Each structure stands twice: as C-alpha cells, then as structure tokens.
Image: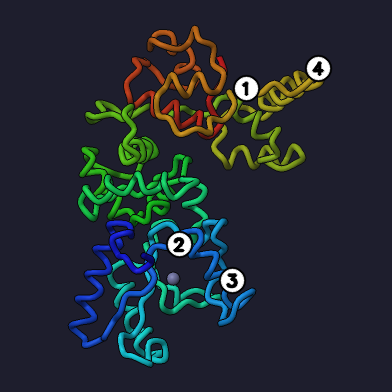
Amino acid sequence: MARDIKQLHPRLQTKVEELKALCAKEGLAIGIGECFRSVAEQDALYAQGRTTAGNIVTNAKGSSYSSQHQWGIAVDFFKNVKGHEYDDAAFFSRVGALAKSIGLGWGGDWTGFVDRPHLYLPDWGSTASKLKEQYGTFENFKKTWTQSSETPKQEAAQPSTYTGNSIVEYLNSVGKPSDFASRTQYAAQYGISNYKGTAEQNLKLLALMRGDSSAPETQPTAPAPKPTKSLEDWAEEVRAGKHGTGHENRKASLKKAGCTYDYEKVRAKVNELCGVKTSTKPASIYYPKYTGNSYGIDTVFAAIGIPEAFLGKPKNRKSIAEKNGVKNYKGTQDQNLYLIGLAKQGKLKKV
Ligand SMILES: [Zn+2]
C-alpha cells in the first residue's frame, strides 16, 4: 500500500492536499506516487539498478531506515499524463516551487542525488538521520503524530535535539525565525514584557519555549544582578592565556578588558592558583559544566556534583549564589535561571 496517503504524517497529508489545490489552479496534472515504504519495499527499490534490472532510484537501504519514505514524511509525485510521467522538466520545477511555497522540502534541490519527484517535511533536515537519532524506530516516531495533528499547524510540536542555552540556536533547530523581532513576539506570547534580549530574558524564553515545567510563570520582579569579575576570575583568564604572554601585554590586555585590580595583585593570584597546580591537578574554581537540559535548580546542581546539603531549600543554596555575585538570594526563578546559566557555561564558582 505504498501509495496510501493515509499512511503519511498527518501534516504531510494536509500539505499534499494544499499542493493539489495549488496545482489544480495552474492546470498542472499532479499525480501522487510513492508514499510510505516498508523495509521490504525499500530493499526491493534499493536492489533496482544494482542486483535487479532498471535504473538506480534510491541510495537508501531498507534496514538502514535512511529513506524519508520509511518515516512517513515523504511523498513522490509525477505528471499524471500517460507515457509522460517523468519527461517534463518544467512541470517538476514548477510543482517543486509550489511545494516549497507551502513549506515542503523538494528533492530537486538536492545535490549529488537529485530526486525531482520527491517532496518531504523538512522539519528534520533533508535526510532521515535526525529522525533515526531521535526516535530510533518508525514506531516511536509515529507515536508523536497524533499529538502534532491535534495541535494547530503553526504550533505543531517540532522536536529539537538542541540542548544548549542559546535561544537563537534553539529556534533555528526547530525551524522558527530567530531574529530580534520574532523573539520579541515570542517573548510577549510567553509573558515576558519589555523584551530587550538580555541573557536572563533569553534563558527564560528558552525554558518557556521548551515547555520546561520549572520555567517561571510570572514576570520577574527584578533582573538578576550581574556579577563583576573577581580577582580570581581575572587570574583564571590570565592562566588560560586570554591576555597573552609577557607582563606588559597582560597588563595592557587586562586594562582594556576592564580589570580594575592592580596588575601585581592579579599576578600574585595567578601564582597562587598555579601553586595549587603543582600538587596534583589544577583545582578548578568552577563546578563542572552542566550539559543537560533541565532548568530545575536542584537537578542541575546535583548533576554537577554539588553536595546534597546545598540542595532543596533556597537558604541552603545561598552561599553558592553569593559566591557567584547574586546578592540577596531568595531562590527566585530569575536568580535560579541565572545560576543555571552560569552552570551551563561551566562558570558557576565553587564555594
Ligand atoms: Zn521519494
């Protein structure tokens, strides 16, 4: 039943109907060919032109699940004129353009193996590898379909594999616009007023858009305080080679970067930090970088090895907060997001 459109992702079914309507308007006789392909069907197709007769039509083996058709997100079309199904280049170009105008991907744009009859949902890129990585099997992927067909088209849940803390990267990963104007609009939708694109606002927006339950529901009362760099921070930078070599270079570079500490003091601190190094390993002043995607403060803290005594209640976390420049720590979501942001950069200082 490879031609059964009902086996396709619901959103693709809708798109195909839209495309047919557009083609009808222009008098383009579009026919719908291959839709969903089973492993056996894909294997048979792979054999064509290799171990069986005919031309090579695919580079994807069935068992590899590397054809988008095996994930129900692709459909092939042809010109519905007997004897001329595939010989009208202009027809394929025009239908490809119409398909792209409604948000579909077109195999005619591929380089290498150009597949002009092929259309697909581009949410997961132009190959099936992201789907394989994310869902493993078609069955797992299919479980997400009902959900996405029930939500409005625009809000369809588009899974993201991005786990970092850049709102721009995140938006790109789910195929949404990430320019400032768009982010301002999202911010307003999610209840963040007066969006200016600050780090705190971006982290919060990211958490909300990811649907994290730990994301703040109300507006912040005050922005999280920005810590100024400590003597240790500057010394760490010098150690990391950020300010070049040689005292004069370092002195000038530090001053330029806004360091107000006396250079000799920074130097002494560097020596002190290097002194620690001689024992065994350099003792980092930071907790290890958090690489997960939780926005729950205790989850994050536990993940980077902060002892249990610091978890649970805000007062237990206070010393860590203060060490990291958060004054008057009360465990507000704003303050927590700020600390989580530091942890995600590997810049949360140890107490
Ligand atoms: Zn195809």
Q: Which of marks 2 and 3 is in front?
A: 3
Q: Which of marks 1 and 4 is nearer the N terminus?
A: 4
- Residue 234 point in image, percent of width and height: 61, 30
> Pointer 3 and pointer 4: residues touching (CB < 8 Å)?
no
Residue for badge 3: 47
Q: Is mark 4 within 8 Å of ligand 1?
A: no
Q: Which amino acid does label 3 sit on?
A: Ala
Secondary structure of residue under mark 4: helix
| Residue in the foreground of this view, choosing between 26 and 179 | 26
Looking at the image, residue 37 lies above or below residue 216: below
Looking at the image, residue 339 lies above or below residue 186: above
Secondary structure of residue under mark 1: loop
| Residue in the foreground of this view, choosing between 276 and 174 | 174
Residue 68, numbered label? 2
Residue 279, numbered label? 4
Secondary structure of residue under mark 3: helix
